[in-house]
């Protein structure tokens, strides 16, 4: 996709680049991101290389660090987008996709002093294949969300 953008658009402006990046490049990176979430460093870095080089297309940004290029283009990191997609899917699985809307995924504990009322319970696993699956991967992030996040979405 990056080669296609480079070849067909010689002079890119910021709004044009953002539109092309969101519609053509990021859609490929986000596809099935909740299912495929790599945990090995080399697997995490491979899609990130394309995102890093894509922002170098714009004039004047080639010599800036990646984080600065993202701030200028107002593009979130792939890591942030992955966490965001995981949290949205967890919310949908817990209440929206269940028959009758009853949240069955959440394990409400009686003595919640921190975090939210919709806490998840992490299952114990033996192998890496299950350790990095969706249902175990989202628990720590989900439990660290404040309670006002859920009140905002429920009402």
Image (cartoon, helix red, strand yellow):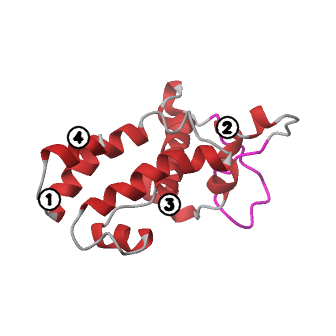
Q: On screen, 38 above or below 81?
A: above
Q: Secondary structure at mark 2?
A: helix
Q: How many marks?
A: 4
**In the picture provided, is 130 more to the left or to the right than 24?**
right
Q: Nearer the viewer, residue 40 or 99?
A: 40
- Foreground of the two, 65 or 23: 65
Q: Which residue is mark 3?
A: 149
Q: Which residue is mark 1?
A: 12
Which of the two labelled residues, at mark 4 and mark 2, occupies the earlier sequence position?
A: 4
Q: Residue at x 77, y 44 (%)?
A: 122
| Cα separation between marks 4 and 2 | 37 Å
Of residues 48 and 144, the one nearer the viewer is 48
Q: Is residue 18 visible?
A: yes
Considering the whole magenta stretch, tell me its main secondary structure. Answer: loop
Disc on the earlier residue, 2 or 1: 1
Q: Are there few (<14), some (14-19), or many (20+) residues within 10 Å of tag 1? A: some
Residue 135's disc is: 2
The residue segment tinted magenta is 104-122
Secondary structure beneath label 1:
loop
**3D distance between C-alphas at marks 4 and 3:** 40 Å
Name the N-terminal-most of marks 2 and 3: 2
Report helix, strand or loop for mark 4: helix
Residue on which disc 4 sits: 4
| 113, above or below 139, in the image | below
Q: Which of disc 3 and disc 1 is earlier in sequence?
A: 1
Q: Position of residue 63 (x, y in %)?
A: 35, 74
Q: Position of residue 100 (x, y in %)?
A: 50, 27
Q: Is residue 155 visible?
A: no
């Amino acid at each position: 996709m990056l080669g296609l953008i480079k070849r067909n658009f010689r002079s890119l402006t910021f709004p044009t680049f953002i539109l092309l990046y969101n519609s053509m490049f990021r859609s490929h990176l986000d596809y099935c991101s909740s299912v495929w979430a790599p945990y090995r460093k080399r697997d995490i870095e491979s899609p990130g290389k394309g995102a890093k080089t894509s922002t170098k297309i714009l004039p004047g940004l080639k010599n800036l660090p990646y984080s600065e290029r993202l701030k200028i283009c107002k593009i979130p990191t792939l890591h942030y987008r992955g966490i965001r997609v995981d949290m949205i899917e967890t919310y949908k699985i817990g209440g929206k996709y269940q028959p009758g809307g009853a949240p069955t995924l959440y394990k409400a504990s009686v003595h919640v002093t921190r975090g939210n009322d919709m806490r998840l319970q992490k299952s114990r696993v033996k192998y890496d294949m299950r350790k990095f699956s969706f249902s175990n991967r989202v628990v720590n992030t989900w439990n660290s969300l404040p309670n006002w996040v859920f009140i905002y979405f429920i009402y």
